[in-house]
Structure formats: C-alpha cells, structure tokens
Amino acid sequence: MDVDQYLKRLKYNGPKDNKASTLREICLCHARNVPFEILDMFGGPRKRLELEKVYQDIVVNNRGGFCYEINGLMRWLLLQLGFEVVVFQSQAYIASTESWNPKFDHMTMLVTCADGSRWLADVGWGGSSFKEPLKFEVMLEQSQPNGRYRLVQLGADEYQVEKRGKCHLKFTPDGGKVRDEKNYRQWRPVYKFDTIPRQWSDFDEMCSYQQDSHESFLKNNTIACKSTETGDLAWWGWNLRERRYIDPDTEETVMIRTAKNLKEVRKWLKEYFDMELDFDVDVQLQDYKDFS
C-alpha cells in the first residue's frame, strides 16, 4: 500500500500535510474520483473489510466501494498524513417512513487537524450529503455548493447531521421547468451517530447484513454515484441521472437516461464512472424515494 499511488488515484496534487485545507481538498478529490458503488453485490466478488483487499479494489483496480470500504481506506490515508482519525457508527434516516436504519448502518469519521480543529469527514455516503468536511460545532450552519448543513446534539455522546431543504427545478415534457419546493428550507436529518470510537471489525456484522439481507436497501438497488465539479452523477438500476447545483439552496436535474440492455450499462459505467467490470450486473431496482 502506497500513499502516493492512492493520491494519484484521487487526482490529488496538493501538499501532504495534516492541515484543514488539505483535508478539505482530499475529501473533494475523493468524492469526485472514487464512486460510491455496490455493483459487486450483483454478480461480483463478496465484499470484505480487509485493508489490502479494499486498497486493491479501489486504488489498483479503479473501482469504488460503499461506506465501510471507502471511509475505512480513507482513514488509513489520513493517518499516514498525520491526522488523528476516529470512526463512529451511524444510522441513516429514512424520510418516507420517518424511521432510522439499524446501528452500524453507516460509518463516519472525526478528524483532528494540526491546529487542533475537529471535522466530521465522510467520503462514503451514497446519497446527497456533505462533500466537504463539517466543522465539529453544534448548530453552526455550514454552506457547501450542494446544500446547507448543521450538527445538532441529541445527547451527551449523540449527534445528528441535518440538511436544509432545497428548491428542485425539474424539466417538463415540453422542455419547461417547474419548481418543487416540498420541504424547502426545512431542516431534516441525514444521519445520527454516537461518538464512541469504533474499530473497522465492529462493522463486519452490518457489512454482511448489507450484502445478504433482503431488508437491506443496498441489497435491492444497483447503485453507483459520484460528485462532479458542478453537481453529481447517480446510476440507479437502469437509470443514469445528472444533477447540477445552482447554489446551496437550488438544484436541477439536467439529464436522465435509461439503458436498454447490459451492453449499454457497461458502456455508461466506463464513460461516466471510469469503471470496467469483468462480470454482468444483475440489475436490481426498487421504488426508493429517499435516495436523492
């Protein structure tokens, strides 16, 4: 495992120190170049939380991964650069049912920089959440190109990431646009987490659950997504969607394409995500409104 090879994979050419500015740039490069993707769950090899395997998959084989893999490997990189890193378990919020996923459903990181500042960093979230690190300070509104975020303290060692609702511009069949302001400016949970330090092995059980349980959202949806300089790309089932961030409060869907067959799936995964697979994807798709 090699730091320089990893940074080259991220297309990061900046300083190799433990400053907050370095953390921010590495997180952005990670989000834009390493997709959140779970395609191996639909025809590929089984996922295992082994550092060398994850490094081989992501850095050498130019693949992506899901939260345990991406954030786990990112933790290794940040430690090599001199940051202090602690990983926490977290639970995603499901807006459609107003419920929470099980504990250890997601992994996030608390990173301490050279100046003592602390940041919540997360390059392994598959939906629309913060890409730049969030300063670990409660009730501080923090603006990024894709939205406004804040941390809310729920208890002595429990916190919640919230995102403020945005205005969505959507195209109509005649080429016009309509404004969808449902939940506009309302603060809604993304996920909650406790601040108990965890080991990578603590996520083994949920890693298996995500791959084996038919109650797992990931088991039922074929997903690949990544950030771009202006928005994000999401491959979900047979559909490819591009979204553009106009400002922190407004976004629009600028492209939706539907693949007709697996040949087209392979072509688009290479074109848009720079991934080549050596297996056919058993595409799965449920009507899941919370993946946005």
Image (cartoon, rainbow, N blue to C red):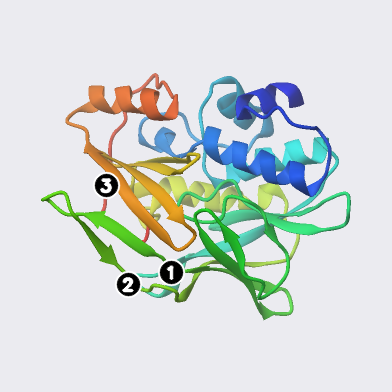
Q: The disc labelled 3 sits on which kind of residue?
A: Leu
In the image, taking residue 238 as reference, residue 90 lies left or right, namely right
Above or below residue 3? Residue 135 is below
Label 2: state its secondary structure: loop
Residue 286, image x, y percentages? 26, 52
Dot 1 crowding, Cα within 10 Å, few <14, some 14–19, many 20+: many
Question: Which numbered disc, 2 or 3, marks the residue closer to the eye?
Answer: 2
Q: Residue 192 shows which numbered tag?
A: none
The answer to which of marks 1 and 3 sits earlier in the sequence is: 1
How far apart marks 1 and 2 lie (CA) works out to: 8 Å
Residue at horizontal 53 percent and vertical 24 percent from the top: 62
Of 4 and 228, the residue lying toward us: 228
Residue underneath mark 1: 165
> For the residue labelled by badge 3, is the local secondary structure a helix, a strand or a loop?
loop
The quadrant of the picture occupied by the C terminus is bottom left
Residue 136 place in picture, x, y as percent: 73, 64
Q: Earlier in the sequence, mark 1 or mark 2?
A: 1
| Element marked by disc 1 | loop
Q: Mark 1 belongs to which amino acid? A: Gly
Q: Which residue is mark 3?
A: 285
Q: Nearer the viewer, residue 282 or 26?
A: 26
Q: CA distance from mark 2 to mark 3?
A: 24 Å
The residue furthest right is: 115
**Left or right of residue 34, residue 11 in this image:** right
| Pointer 1 with pointer 2, Cβ within 8 A | yes
Could you tell me if the residues under marks 2 and 3 are in contact, i.e. CB atoms within 8 Å?
A: no
| Residue 237 x/y as whole percent | 28, 42
Q: Which residue is mark 2?
A: 182
Q: For the residue marked with disc 2, what is the amino acid?
A: Lys
Q: Earlier in the sequence, mark 2 or mark 3?
A: 2
Mark 3 is surrounded, within 10 Å at the Cα level, by few (under 14), some (14 to 19) or many (20 or more) other residues, namely some
